[in-house]
Image (spheres, rainbow, N blue to C red):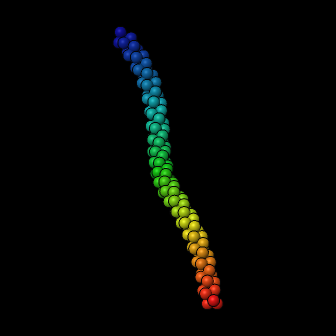
Amino acid sequence: MFLLESARIETELKSADEKYAIADDELKETNATYESIKAEYERLGNDMQQMDERIESLRESITSTSSTRQKLENQIELLKEQIHTAKMTDEHLQSRLLAIEKEKAERLKSRKEYDDKKLHWKLR
């Protein structure tokens, strides 16, 4: 009976050793898979952080560009208004110049008439 019991225990021990070896192999495989997944997760985390930094950089660039665009649009509007004002001033000065030239011509004509009358009165 001792031999029989010893054989049964030895069979169970072999079975347990085989199960242990299988479990050990599965544990090693699972650990390797875990390490691989962990490394991939860390790589993806780093990639994501770099993408977030790139997005933030692009947002800042867009904000800066938008601000610069607004400043330039404001300057363009200001220059348009200054051009319009300069044109209006030019038109005003042209009309004033024409009025002065007309007045000058009338005064010269009036002076000539006066000189003619004066000469006429002297000759009489």
Q: Give residue 119's quadrant in the image.
A: bottom right
Foreground pick, 43 / 21: 43
Foreground pick, 103 / 14: 103
Q: Can the viewer see residue 117 in this picture? A: yes
The residue under the point 38% across, 16% down is: 9
The residue under the point 62% across, 81% down is: 112
Q: Can the viewer see residue 57 in this picture? A: no
Position in image of residue 48 (x %, y %) = 47, 42
Position in image of residue 100 (x %, y %) = 57, 73
The residue under the point 40% across, 17% down is: 12
The residue under the point 60% across, 72% down is: 102
Foreground pick, 3 / 32: 32
Relative to 110, is 24 on the left or the right? left
Classify the position of the C terminus by image quarter.
Answer: bottom right
Classify the position of the N terminus by image quarter.
Answer: top left
Give the vertical position of 103 relative to 86 (above or below): below
Foreground pick, 95 / 63: 95
Total labels: the figure holds 0
Position in image of residue 71 (x %, y %) = 48, 57
Give the vertical position of 66 relative to 91 (above or below): above
Q: Residue furthest front?
A: 124
Q: Residue furthest left?
A: 2
Q: Residue furthest top?
A: 1
Position in image of residue 65 (x %, y %) = 50, 53
Relative to 92, is 31 on the left or the right? left
Give the vertical position of 58 relative to 41 (above or below): below
